[in-house]
Image: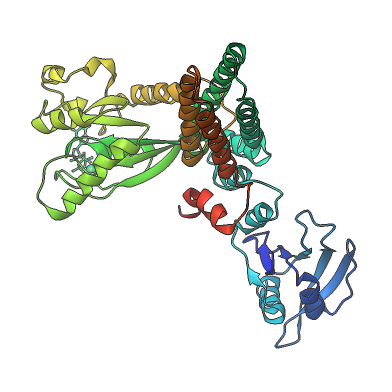
Amino acid sequence: MHETIIVNVAGEVPFFSHFLLIGPKTYDILKKIFNVELKPGEYKEATLKDPRTKRKVDRVKIIYLDKNQSDINVPMAMIAGTGGYVIPTLVEMAIAKGGARMAAPYEIVKYRYLLGSIDLLMAHGYMDMLNARTEKGVQIARRRYEGALSERFRDIIDSIRDIASSINGMDEDKRKSIITRLNALIGRIRFLYAQGIRGMVYVKGLEVAIVGRPNVGKSTLFNRLVGKERSIVTHIPGTTRDIIKEAVEIEGVALTFYDTAGYRETEEYVEKIGVERSKKMLDLSHFVLFVLDASSGLLEEDKKLWKLLKGERIVVFNKIDQAKDLESFEVLEDLHRYENVFVSGKTGEGFGDLIKAIKNEINRYFHISEDLALTKREGESLRYVLDTIEDVKEKLKMKGNEIGSKAKLENAANLLEDVMGISWRTETKFKNALSDILEA
Ligand SMILES: Nc1nc2c(ncn2[C@@H]2O[C@H](COP(=O)(O)OP(=O)(O)OP(=O)(O)O)[C@@H](O)[C@H]2O)c(=O)[nH]1
Ligand SMILES: [Mg+2]
């Protein structure tokens, strides 16, 4: 670390300011600003003066740690003050006197990574903690930050390398024993994979799109579900154009509902874009609320959209206050494989059933209590490693594949190590691994 950065720890609290100054110039900068001798590890009081008016801004408390005392091997200081003006004054002076700069929230964790005290899995856990939506989500993220996932990755890497190194001088017994070990390893990776994919839902929540043809009442239902008049409702089909989202918490899980543009074939330019976005939401959602209009009966567009749906869904018959022709819906294939609920967005009738159906969907994801989570990138890498090992297992059943198998296993181990970011550490690696968070 060659820069010196200022971290505003207390954030926006007006009557309390708490800073960290971190980096090689920490000592010099503090000496210039406060004109005091600082001894490592000692507590010191000093007066902060405005550089222009020379008037006293605040009496601050400083604790300076040299590089041996600080946990990231870089000098740092904690500075606490009470007045609101400490913030701009101190920042201004630290910049002017020593070229320090204000740090982004993720920078501490970046330095911890670059300096070797945590890996990328842990770094991601730290950021997940800041972004977690529920208590359970924080717990999972914290375990990751503390290294629980890294430990599992290391075990897997060690096992892979161990097995790879024992592939030589093969006789039948050895071949059998290696295949047994590969089987056990496959089981472990599968378990971690399944657990981690479900676990991430606790951190990030579930995404639920409300879909249906125009005018069936999607926005009306959306507003009721999120408890506010967020989306525009009119009698005109094609009212909603862009996707509108809002999060609520149900059963300790953060659900983000997406109100989408009504599905229909249209040549109207803006609406067309909206419809494309709705279609995309079908793939991104964990499940959808498919809305039908009970007052109009089934239309051609309902049928078309039904055919586009692939995943889990709750079928919501809306406008039940004016229900007419419910039989017409029976032609939808597999209609009764999914939960059917009957509601009125207008009167609120049937909403208890809808919430119950949503809770059932949530429970499908959470029937096991998870304590680890994987990001998409980590999940894909594990998946790849799993496929590789299964492939190696099949190949090793026959003679003559030993050298190739050994190399494949070694590559798989290297890939996992790369996901952890521990073979070598760069800023680019950090940014790539956390891009899902940093760019959000
Ligand atoms: N009678 C009755 N009318 C409803 C009900 N729910 C919605 N409506 C009316 O149906 C019309 C369309 O409602 P929206 O919520 O805008 O429908 P939408 O599906 O979002 O429509 P688009 O955004 O155009 O796709 C409005 O006039 C609503 O007041 C209901 O349960 N009963
Ligand atoms: Mg709408």
In percent of width and height, residue 381 lies at 49, 37
Quarter of the figure with residue 261:
top left
Residue 23 visible in the shown view:
yes
Identify the residue at horizontal 58%, vertical 22% (top origin): 185
> How was this image coloured?
rainbow
Q: Is residue 311 left or right of residue 171?
A: left
Quarter of the figure with residue 218:
top left
Ligand 1 in which quarter: top left
Q: Is residue 170 left or right of residue 304?
A: right
In percent of width and height, residue 64 lies at 83, 64
Identify the residue at horizontal 26%, vertical 50% (top origin): 242
Above or below, 438 against 182 in this view is below
428 or 306: which is nearer to us?
428
In percent of width and height, residue 349 lies at 29, 26
Quarter of the figure with residue 143:
top right
Above or below, 382 against 174 in this view is below
Above or below, 44 against 115 in this view is below
364 or 47: which is nearer to us?
364
Above or below, 14 against 118 in this view is below
Number of numbered tags placed on the structure image: 0
Residue 224 visible in the shown view:
no
Q: Residue furthest bottom?
A: 53
In percent of width and height, residue 434 lies at 53, 50
Q: Which quadrant does the N terminus fall into?
A: bottom right
